[in-house]
Image: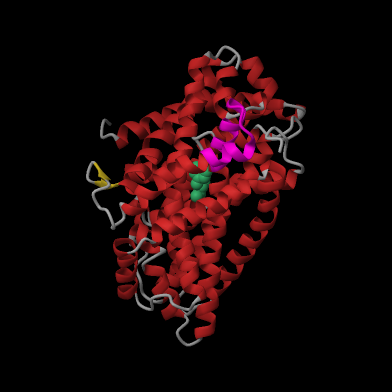
Amino acid sequence: MDSRSTFSSRMGLVLATAGSAVGLGNLWRFSYVTGENGGAAFVVIYIICVILLGIPCMVGEFIIGRSQGANAVRAYAKLPKANNWWGLVGALGVLTSIVILGFYCVVAGWCLHYLGCALADNIPATSAESAAYFKNLNENTWYPVIWGIVFLLLTHVIVRFGVKNGIERVSKYLMPVLLFLLFVLMVAACSLPGAWRGVKFLFQPDWDCVNVNTFIEALGQAFFSLSLGMTCLCTYASYFDKGTNLVLTANQIAILDTMVAILAGLIIFPAAFAVGVQPDSGPGLVFVTLPGVFHTAFSEMPTMGFVISVMFYALIVLAALTSTISMHEVGTAFFTEETKLSRPAAAWIMTIITVIITIPCALSQGLVPQFSVLGMDLLSFLDTMSGNYFMPIGALLSCAVLGWIVPSDYVRREFVGSQPRLAVLFLPLIILLRFVCPIFIIVVMLSKLGLL
Ligand code: PHE
């Protein structure tokens, strides 16, 4: 299995990379963050963050990965004028991907469990029942641990088969299914009586809700959703060829990712408003609020309710899987290239290290509440640390290395590749990478720390 093979088609490349971006961030996180930050106004700010900061940072990661054709640690260390210390940025990326994969598998495991419940037509019927069910699941059973590990093993099996035969092949099937489910669910949710209030919530901005915090949340969400700042895209780009148009690819991925988030909003908010549930119930939205919502909304058509629930949880599981694959690949590429191990053995190392994080994260949700740090359960702590610090720092350093360390002639050559038309975009890109992105990220981090 050749870990340095390239994606075999442009379609495969875009679907695999978009698969990394489209995940729980779009379906679970986007909806509750939008719900908590006032709806449409947040969406507008989010889109601005994606265009001004997300796309340039994505192109930056692509340049680093494609120019070196190596795992993240080696890619950063080998950039011209960079020294071995820059390899630490890649190492931070590998570490972050292990941490995120560790807790992400717990949430994805919940989804798998709910998919099982939906298939058995066993989903709690009211929000109160859902809340008790979700609490009980975490406090009294080993299911979260087991489902988390099952999800990780599923990811492992795909990554083990390599870039072409594993990641690309699976993405080519899963992404179209995912988009199909999304459309069907959107039509079903928007046709519920009273659904228009949810649509309005998503599209009619209420600027009074906007404050500094809205910008912080929007930037964090954009980074998380586009898989930025943890060398995931850098690793995928190491499998791109020189003919890949990096700007076009970044635009396509950003558009797909944002479209999926908005479509997910068009499922969740109309359904919630149709049954009179407020959409600002935080991270529990998908596991506590929604099961009851689907049940109530389709109470007169129980079969429809059943089908919708199954489709919805299948959708989240697929989306999560295409993302966990990309996180796993960061470490697998690293262990394959930096040790003498075969790809399957390297994939096992990555899986085993991740399990060490997944288990306490799952237990910290209730069975063993002692697994907490700074007053937060382990899962929330790692989520906060990676989203608020590791990812922005990773993104900041990737902008810094391209903007300030690597000679700009080299950056230009690697950016253009074999697409001379891109040359005109180099100046705006370098201005964004040198000044706009770093300044914005620093301001956001300082205000998160309460220093601004
Ligand atoms: N972008 C993914 C999502 O939206 C999460 C992710 C983060 C994936 C970082 C890979 C790397 O869920």
Q: Number of numbered discs present? A: 0
Q: Is residue 176 visible?
A: yes
Does the stretch in magenta take in 115? Answer: no
Q: Is residue 221 visible?
A: no
**Residue 258, percent from left and from top:** 55, 51
**Residue 272, percent from left and from top:** 41, 70
Rendered-image quadrant of the C terminus? top left
Q: Nearer the viewer, residue 106 or 230?
A: 106
**Residue 270, percent from left and from top:** 46, 70
Q: Residue furthest bottom?
A: 300
Residue sitting at x 51%, y 66% = 313
Does the stretch in magenta take in 337? Answer: yes
The region drawn magenta spans 328-349
Residue sitting at x 58%, y 51% = 322
Q: Nearer the viewer, residue 43 or 66?
A: 66
Q: Nearer the viewer, residue 38 or 2?
A: 2
Residue sitting at x 64%, y 65% = 180
Above or below, 38 against 268 in this view is: above
Above or below, 218 against 404 in this view is: below
Provide the major secondary structure of the magenta segment. Answer: helix
Above or below, 85 against 131 in this view is: above
Rendered-image quadrant of the N terminus? top right
